[in-house]
């Protein structure tokens, strides 16, 4: 799979250089992933093929097409084992999840006239990335407050946010927490999700839905706390487990 992907990238990017003299290839690397795409040298907008690859083995995680910085056509998203996760057609606004991905998640909280209610959907709100990408982003951007370690208070916080019909994140709320100091850090990490989501839909019509994020935090000095195991990832629930080792309490002077 990775060999075919590399050959395809070389051929496609070669064609891009020939056809569009104003296009330039760019590679962006992070700790674990590499992005390869072309952009217009004048407008600086993404134009043409886009790939996101795992750096360790060159497996494809995401591939699709851009036109003037907008996603177009068929995009494919994979899991970390290079298995297809879901396909999204940006021209038709249709999502196709692989078999098994909608088990126990075809009913999500959707905004109705009288508030949010569980309703069956064509597809829940989907982050347009490889499976687990939004979870990884939330893990990376979460910056726990110093007071969390000073109080040595393990526990969990449940946050929710809405994804509107345009795929935008709005109305971030702390549903439950045992530490009010953590609220700003949670909201800040969620706000850093800048890429628009694929909104949930009912009968092919986008609707406002709610996503939940559970921050499950364990501090090693808090021997009475065991990380809660009853929560599981679903397409509308993201569980983040944090274990902080070797923390030491700072006394106020």
Image (cartoon, rainbow, N blue to C red):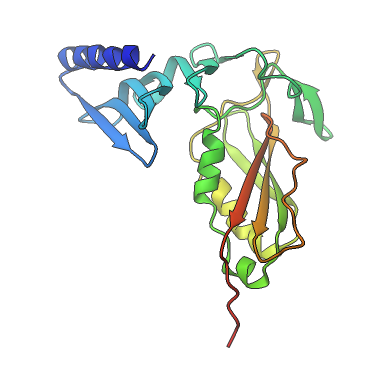
* Residue 238, above or below 82: below
Foreground pick, 209 / 253: 253
Q: Which residue is depicted at the point 53% across and 15% down? A: 87
Q: Is residue 247 left or right of residue 1?
A: right
- Where does residue 21 sit, x and y in percent of width and height? 15, 19
- Where does residue 65 sit, x and y in percent of width and height? 38, 18
Foreground pick, 210 / 206: 210
Q: Which residue is depicted at the point 35% across and 25% down? A: 58
- Where does residue 176 sit, x and y in percent of width and height? 77, 53
Quarter of the figure that contains the C terminus: bottom right
Q: Which residue is depicted at the point 35% across and 22% down? A: 50
The residue lying furthest to the right in this view is 114
Q: Is residue 253 left or right of residue 152?
A: left
Q: Is residue 25 left or right of residue 185?
A: left
Residue 221 found in image quarter: bottom right
- Where does residue 56 sit, x and y in percent of width and height? 37, 32
Quarter of the figure that contains the N terminus: top left
Task: Count the numbered circles shown.
Answer: 0
The residue lying furthest to the bottom in this view is 253
Q: Which residue is depicted at the point 67% across and 16% down? A: 100
Residue 135 found in image quarter: top right
* Residue 138, above or below 12: below
């Amino acid at each position: 799979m990775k060999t075919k992907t590399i050959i395809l990238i070389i051929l496609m990017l070669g064609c891009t250089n020939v056809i569009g003299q104003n296009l330039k290839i760019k590679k962006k690397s992070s700790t674990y992933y590499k992005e390869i795409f072309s952009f217009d040298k004048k407008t600086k907008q993404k134009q043409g093929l886009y790939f996101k690859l795992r750096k360790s083995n060159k497996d494809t995680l995401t591939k699709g097409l851009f036109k003037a910085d907008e996603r177009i056509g068929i995009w494919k998203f994979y899991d970390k084992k290079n298995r297809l996760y879901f396909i999204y057609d940006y021209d038709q606004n249709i999502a196709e999840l692989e078999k098994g991905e909608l088990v126990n998640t075809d009913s999500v909280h959707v905004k109705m006239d009288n508030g949010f209610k569980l309703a069956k959907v064509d597809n829940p709100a989907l982050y347009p990335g490889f499976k687990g990408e939004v979870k990884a982003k939330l893990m990376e951007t979460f910056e726990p407050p110093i007071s969390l370690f000073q109080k040595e208070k393990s526990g969990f916080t449940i946050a929710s946010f809405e994804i509107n019909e345009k795929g935008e994140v709005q109305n971030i709320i702390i549903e439950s927490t045992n530490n009010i100091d953590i609220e700003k850090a949670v909201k800040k990490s969620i706000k850093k999700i800048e890429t628009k989501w694929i909104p949930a839909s009912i009968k092919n019509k986008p609707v406002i839905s709610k996503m939940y994020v559970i921050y499950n935090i364990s501090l090693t000095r808090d021997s009475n706390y065991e990380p809660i195991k009853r929560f599981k990832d679903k397409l509308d629930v993201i569980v983040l487990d944090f274990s902080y080792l070797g923390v030491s309490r700072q006394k106020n002077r």
